[in-house]
Image (tube, rainbow, N blue to C red):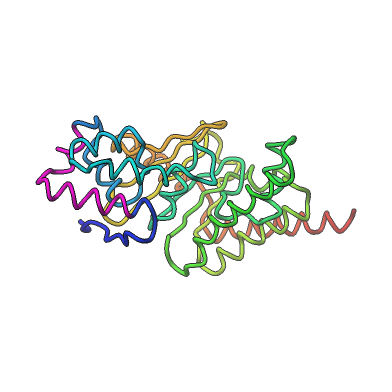
Amino acid sequence: MPGPKKLDPSSSPRALLGAELRHRREAADLSQEDLGAPLFVSGSFIGQLEAGTRRMQIDQAQKLDEVLGADGFFVRNCAALRKSKYPDHFAEAAEAEREAIVIKEYAPLLIPGLLQTEAYARAVFRGGLPTATDDVIDELVAARLERAQLLTDPTTPLVWVVLDEAVLRRHKGGRAVMAEALRHIATLAQRHRVIVQVLPFSAGAHTALEGPLKLMSFSGAPPLAYLQGLGTGQLRDDPSTVGQCELTYDLLVASALAPDASLALIESVAEDYAHENQQF
């Protein structure tokens, strides 16, 4: 089992809090389970706070200050964690995403944010927020493209995505936008930066009909599952839920086209969009 992840306390507020939390817990001779008990959270949750994969909430900071005699340190520094460019229901997941070494995702309707082009992201946000100002849309697009910078690293995180065929077929932004978006995914797959599989319509009923799924694994911290709905999202760490989500993803992979066949389909649909666009 890997040891605790070494954090650079200067790299982010979460890293600072995580490193300090681990230091004070060990100085108090408490296990992660011991410290989790008065907060009514699991030991694995404390481990995730220490590893910087979970966001500390203000009520947790208050209790940690009390239990560890930290003289308000955690409350004072927790405020910085509450500032995020992402919606509240996704902010913690976005932070965890930056620490993940493996990201697996099933997308039933949209290209996942990490794989989106600027034009596609703009079309998605404009469709979902038809009355928003251009400035608001610009900020959302910029934040999404910033997330995609994770893929500039040649190997980490490993990203494995299963796209429902509906992702390829539903127009967002027009044919030219769709052609560009699918070619971008194909390029990432051809460069071996991501693994992409398509779950075809012919697969019929499957294990994730109720919605999207994201799984994240970390070095030195337990895995997380992110479950999303309309304007809502839940980051789950309980082993039974994460285990069920991992099984769900494995079954989706088994029902999906192989990576080579998936790439061929993505390229074919992209060419269809490009050809159709030239006719108009």
Taking the spot 43% from the left edge, 55% from the top edge, the residue there is 98
Count how many numbered circles sit on residues in the image.
Answer: 0
Q: How far from the left and from the top, in percent, is residue 137? A: 69, 45
- Image position, residue 273 (x, y; %): 77, 54
Q: Position of residue 188 (x, y in %)?
A: 57, 64
Q: Horizontal placement of 10 versus 2: left or right? A: right
In this view, the residue farthest toward the right is 280
**79 falls in the magenta region:** no
Magenta range is: 16-37
Residue 179 vs residue 147, the one in the foreground: 147
| In the displayed structure image, the side of residue 239 where residue 107 appears, left or right | right
Q: Quadrant of residue 56?
A: top left
The quadrant holding residue 226 is: top left
Magenta stretch, main secondary structure class? helix
Residue 11 location (% of width, % of height): 38, 60
Q: Is residue 17 magenta?
A: yes
102 or 279: nearer the viewer: 102
Of the 4 image quadrants, the one containing the N terminus is bottom left
Q: Quick check: 250 above or below 232?
A: below
Residue furthest out toward the front: 71
Judge left or right: residue 122 versus residue 280.
Answer: left
Q: Residue at x 61, y 62 (%)?
A: 186
Answer with the quarter of the image where residue 263 lies. Answer: bottom right
Q: Nearer the viewer, residue 17 or 155?
A: 17
Query: What residue appears at the point 41 percent right and 39 percent down from the top-left corner?
Result: 248
Front position in the image: 92 or 267 = 92
Residue occupying image coordinates x 60% and y 48% = 111
